[in-house]
Amino acid sequence: MTKNRRALGAIATGVLAAGTLVSAPAGAAPATATSQSAACSLRLGSITPGGDHTQQTITATPSAGARQVGPKDIYADGQAHLPTSVRTELVVPAGEERTGLAVVGVRMYGTSYMTDGTGTAIVPGTLRQTLVGGGWDDLHKYVELSRSTAGGIERSNVYSLINQFTDGLIARWTVTPSGWKYYTTFGGFKAVKTMALIGQGSTYDTFLATTNGGALYTVRIPTGSGKPVVTKVRTSTWQSFETLIAEKCGNYGTLLLGIDKDTGSGYLYAVGHANGTATVIKGLGKVPTTFPATDSYFRYYSAGTNLTGA
């Protein structure tokens, strides 16, 4: 039995029994934001059942800007889900280029387009849908693409949380100019409910992961050889969130949004640099907006941004 499986064995046994269902994790400190975290924000996106993109700014106050719908009809109705973060780059004379991944039906596609100055309409002729491959069925629970330039090293890795019948796997690919390569899987993650990327190094990516029983862990995955390192952060009360969205906050912190699709609610947290159970987590409060349960959520980020929360 590997060290990784022993560590996550604790998730699947004793930890899963801990905690009761609550809207806001009791493991977070009272809602007292520092001046640094109060200035932080994240740009939330989603795919609607109609195949549209949306965007909305969530700030650490907490507050929520107006939800903008568009561009519309990027995907066929009811087909797109499991979006990755979407990278944005400003273009001349106005608007931006946006690129990311999403599953359409059971196939993974790369999506790119340019917006006009409104940010909600596509410049004609710029929408591209590139087929990556098939097999992306309902066993896939979470997908993320990590593009990092940490330490001056450019790399791209894709991760998927897969709910196998007898185990839970995290799969990792390395994205190269000639395609996705070096497919690797790590077992022992059956109890994980959802994840969010919080740290990008030159040789690793780190995720916050919640379990069905409410525990919160970091999972540090090397981009080369080696096994993930799993570290407990909290033992209970995080199970109500179906989606986690993380954005850089300060030099080494994270602004974390937890979305409870059962109630359409979202809660914000200022998370200090990951340090096991000593990690500081401050509850910033409930976000004053509704998060439709039928949407699939993601984060817009500026090209060149590296997450440094772990």
Image: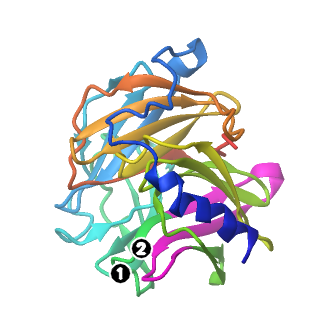
What numbered label is drawn on residue 140?
A: 2
Q: Nearer the viewer, residue 298 or 114?
A: 298
Q: Secondary structure at mark 1?
A: loop
What numbered label is drawn on residue 137?
A: 1
Magenta stretch bounds: 144-169
- Specify whether 193 is left or right of 23: right
Q: Nearer the viewer, residue 28 or 174?
A: 28
Above or below, 129 relative to 291: below
Above or below, 304 relative to 13: above
x and y percentages locating residue 86 in the rendered image: 46, 54
Q: Quadrant of the C terminus?
A: top right
x and y percentages locating residue 213 in the rendered image: 43, 53
Q: CA distance from mark 2 to mark 1?
A: 6 Å
The answer to whether residue 119 shows anywhere in this view is no
Question: Dot 1: within a 10 Å radius of its alpha carbon, few (fewer than 14), some, or many (20 or more) residues?
Answer: some
Q: Quadrant of the N terminus?
A: bottom right
x and y percentages locating residue 250 in the rendered image: 64, 27
Q: Secondary structure at mark 2?
A: strand
The answer to whether residue 272 shows anywhere in this view is yes
What numbered label is drawn on residue 204?
A: none
* Residue in the picture at 47% in, 65% down: 143
Question: Dot 2: within a 10 Å radius of its alpha carbon, few (fewer than 14), some, or many (20 or more) residues?
Answer: many
x and y percentages locating residue 173 in the rendered image: 62, 76
Identified by mark 1, the residue type is Asp
Verify CB contact (< 8 Å) between mark 2 and mark 1.
Answer: yes
Identified by mark 2, the residue type is His
